[in-house]
Amino acid sequence: RLRDDGVSMTVVFINLDGFQPINDSMGVQSGDHLLKKTAERLQATVERPGAVGRYGGDEFIVVYVGTTDDDGEKLAITLKSAIRQPYLIAQTEIHLTASVGVTYLNAGEDGDPIAQAEFAMRRAKQLGGNICCRYTFDMHERYVYQAWLRNKLQLAIDNHQLTVYYQPIIATATERCIAVEALVRWQHKGRFISPGEFIPIAEKTGQIIPLGELVLNQVLRDLAHNSDLRALSVSVNVSSQQLQRYQFPELLAQLLRDTQVAAEAITLELTEGVLVDQSNQNLQALQKLQEMHCTIAIDDFGTGFSSLSYLSQIPAKVIKLDRSFIVDMEHDPERLELVRTIISMCHALGRIVVAEGVETQEQVTILRSLNVDRMQGFYFARPMPLKELLNYLRQ
Ligand code: C2E
Ligand code: CA
Ligand code: CA
Ligand code: CA
């Protein structure tokens, strides 16, 4: 804590982008040299009463006292520019950039300026680096909320407080439910926290691994105990981390054996990224899953980077057209044309097309005329607990 003397202050937090001890020919020593030079430059740039400190390997803090609110960003930008000047080391010009965070505290204002400047630096880093960000209260709130969410999610995982809901997927031809998608649900003190909020966090922290296992366990138990469910195909979302680590195909095979559920009952929904990134590991895992007779589906198709021409190489039987194509399709002829093209191309390649996020009768009519195979969305049914689903299936 720096707040003891009732002065206003600006704190600048600097983190070098992509910094590594310079390449082998120059050795680690050059890296240290570079860091020392950076510290000297920062020191030379500081004109006002200020102090430069090394914070970690390639992190520096500059503290200015007696500044005004307006000064902060200017000072930070001056420091950032000082780093941009090329460095000359062993006759080689080296270019560095930095992610810079800055915060200003009034005299007597409470707060932890170093932590604040660090939050702001992280944001600068997230935005791609070589940029200066100013701390705002919003930023802090989001950070605190995410940290809270992460801790609560861990408790929820440990205490098995996550559940699985199922959303029907309808066959266009018969209008009957032909499959369901398992979607994780987290009820915290009576309020549902959206997967849109906690899945990205779980991906970042690695909690997606135990979370995914929990979901898979639940789905297989539900399948084992309900023949009505076994008559359908049950989709499970699998994150790329799950696929790449912890021998996912073996884990699934074991679970299938334990519960005596046929692999044919399971569809694994993977995002485009996983399928396009044909690294050995991914490819091997996918091959194994197909040999086991699991169905592979591409989730959120059309949002990733893969081009249509890539479709033929992607080893997935089911293509799930992302909701963003369906929203507003009735008012956007170009989008409609795109959907038509994707569907006919998928059909030419022998794939099954599912439209996600179908909400209106109009969309149903259009999708039917485009020969989409399956539809999923609030128009037909929302995700629901197993019990409700079983009632729904009996109707
Ligand atoms: P997703 O895989 O694309 O799942 C479909 C999402 O769209 C679900 O949101 C579903 O409730 C919602 N949805 C379905 N029909 C409609 C509709 O007509 N209109 C609108 N506006 N939305 C509709 P949910 O359950 O909030 O899940 C969000 C995302 O979180 C999922 O997107 C998926 O990426 C992820 N997720 C959910 N459960 C799991 C899980 O068990 N494991 C993993 N790895 N990810 C999961
Ligand atoms: Ca760095
Ligand atoms: Ca999905
Ligand atoms: Ca989706």
Image (cartoon, rainbow, N blue to C red):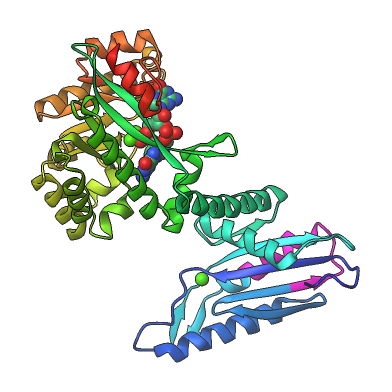
Please tell me whether residue 56 belongs to the stretch shown in magenta: no
Q: Looking at the image, which is closer to me, 334 or 178?
A: 178
Residue range highlighted in magenta: 63-80
Q: Name above or below for residue 219 compared with residue 102.
A: above
- In the picture, measured across the screen, residue 222 lies left or right of residue 103, that is left
The N terminus sits in image quarter: bottom right
Q: Looking at the image, which is closer to me, 104 or 319?
A: 319
Q: Name above or below for residue 61 compared with residue 202.
A: below
The C terminus sits in image quarter: top left
x, y (%) of residue 157? 45, 51
Residue at image x 31%, y 51%?
A: 240
User: To which quarter of the image does residue 358 belong?
Assistant: top left
- In the picture, measured across the screen, residue 103 lies left or right of residue 299, that is right
Q: Looking at the image, which is closer to me, 187 or 270?
A: 187
Residue at image x 58%, y 56%?
A: 123
Q: Looking at the image, which is closer to me, 381 or 55?
A: 381
Residue at image x 91%, y 68%?
A: 6
User: To which quarter of the image does residue 8 belong?
Assistant: bottom right
User: To which quarter of the image does residue 107 belong?
Assistant: bottom right
How many numbered discs, if any? 0
Q: Which quarter of the frame holds ligand 3?
A: top left
